[in-house]
Image (spheres, rainbow, N blue to C red):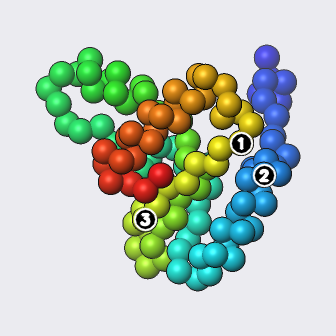
Amino acid sequence: MRLAELYQRQDKLFSAAERSFFGVLQQACGNDYVIVGKVRVADVITVSPTKNRALRQKSFNRICAKRFDFVLCDKNDLSVQCVIELDDQSHQKRKRQQRDQFLDELTQAVNCIG
């Protein structure tokens, strides 16, 4: 099968709610931060070194496919200052609430603001 038959381009990067929030966030932040959207958790938080390879892989697997809605970065060095997760209607589902709880605990444990 050809690639064009397997994949298609997304029309928009953000949902309507995310786009609306992005605009408000831009106004609130002004020129103080760079706002990056849809950032992989594993690009912000890394698994600590351990000799237990199975535990390291399991820990990585818990974060590798998850994303933060927005990350605020210092405008000078792009260091992460804050992560933001929007809670829309999809966050009412039990599985999503468990995911949110894990991310809340994780961001607190590594001193990211979630």
Q: Is residue 65 visible?
A: no
- Residue type at mark 1? Asp
| Residue at mark 3 to residue at mark 2: CA–CA distance | 23 Å
Residue placed under numbered mark 1 in the picture = 88
Q: Residues within 10 Å of mark 1 (few under 14, many from 20)?
A: few
Return the disc, 2 or 1, that comes first in the chain's sequence. 2
- How many numbered callouts? 3
Q: Is residue 82 left or right of residue 47?
A: right
- Residue type at mark 2? Ala
- Most extreme residue toward the bottom is 31
Which SS class for mark 1?
Answer: loop
Q: Residues within 10 Å of mark 3 (few under 14, many from 20)?
A: some
- Circle number at residue 17: 2
Instruction: Give coordinates of residue 58: x percent, y percent.
Output: 35, 21
Instruction: Give coordinates of residue 28: x percent, y percent.
Output: 64, 75
Q: Residue at x 27, y 26 (%)?
A: 56
Kindly report which numbered mark, 1 or 3, lies closer to the viewer in this rendering.
1
Q: Nearer the viewer, residue 52 or 24?
A: 24
Q: Nearer the viewer, residue 72 or 111?
A: 111
Residue placed under numbered mark 3 in the picture = 81
Q: Is residue 72 left or right of residue 25?
A: left
Q: Pointers 3 and 2 in contact (CB under 8 A)?
A: no
Q: Is residue 27 left or right of residue 81?
A: right
| Residue at mark 1 to residue at mark 3: CA–CA distance | 23 Å
| Residue at mark 2 to residue at mark 1: CA–CA distance | 8 Å
Q: Pointers 2 and 1 in contact (CB under 8 A)?
A: yes
Q: Residues within 10 Å of mark 2 (few under 14, many from 20)?
A: few
Residue 72 sits above or below residue 92 on the image:
below
Residue 96 sits above or below residue 18 on the image:
above
- Residue type at mark 3? Gln
Return the disc, 3 or 2, that comes first in the chain's sequence. 2
